[in-house]
């Protein structure tokens, strides 16, 4: 059981090291005062040009 905890600690240390050396990954938490980009709301879908035709009724045999 102790081997699992040691392996996890080594894996976590390697993962954090790789994230820190990776470049543009910031582990500093939430940043305030950064530029905020407003995205426009999606446009409403256009109404259907013609309603769908009903399916033809079955012919009795």
Image: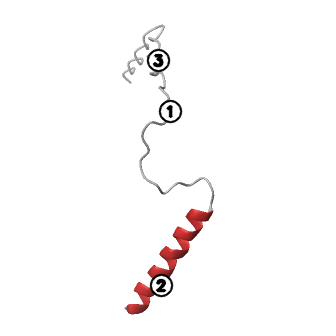
Q: Residues within 10 Å of mark 1 (few under 14, many from 20)?
A: few
Residue 4, x across and y down, in percent: 42, 86
Residue 44, x across and y down, in percent: 43, 16
Secondary structure beneath dot 3 equals: loop
Q: Is residue 48 above or below residue 6?
A: above
Q: Residue furthest front?
A: 33
Q: Quadrant of the C terminus?
A: top left
Q: Which residue position is annotated with label 3?
A: 43
Q: Residue at x 62, y 61 (%)?
A: 22
Tally of marks: 3
Q: Is residue 7 above or below residue 61?
A: below
Q: Residue at x 50, y 81 (%)?
A: 10
Q: Earlier in the sequence, mark 1 or mark 2?
A: 2
Q: What is the CA distance from the residue labelled 3 to the residue labelled 1?
A: 25 Å
Residue 3, x across and y down, in percent: 43, 91
Q: Which residue position is annotated with label 1?
A: 35
Disc number lying in front (3 or 1): 1
Q: Residue at x 59, y 67 (%)?
A: 18
Task: Kindly check if marks 3 and 2 are in contact, taking CB atoms under 8 A apart as contact.
Answer: no
């Amino acid at each position: 059981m102790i081997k699992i905890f040691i392996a996890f600690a080594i894996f976590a240390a390697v993962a954090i090291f790789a994230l820190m050396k990776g470049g543009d990954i910031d582990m500093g938490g939430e940043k305030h005062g950064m530029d905020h980009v407003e995205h426009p709301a999606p446009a409403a879908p256009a109404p259907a040009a013609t309603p769908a035709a009903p399916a033809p009724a079955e012919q009795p045999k």
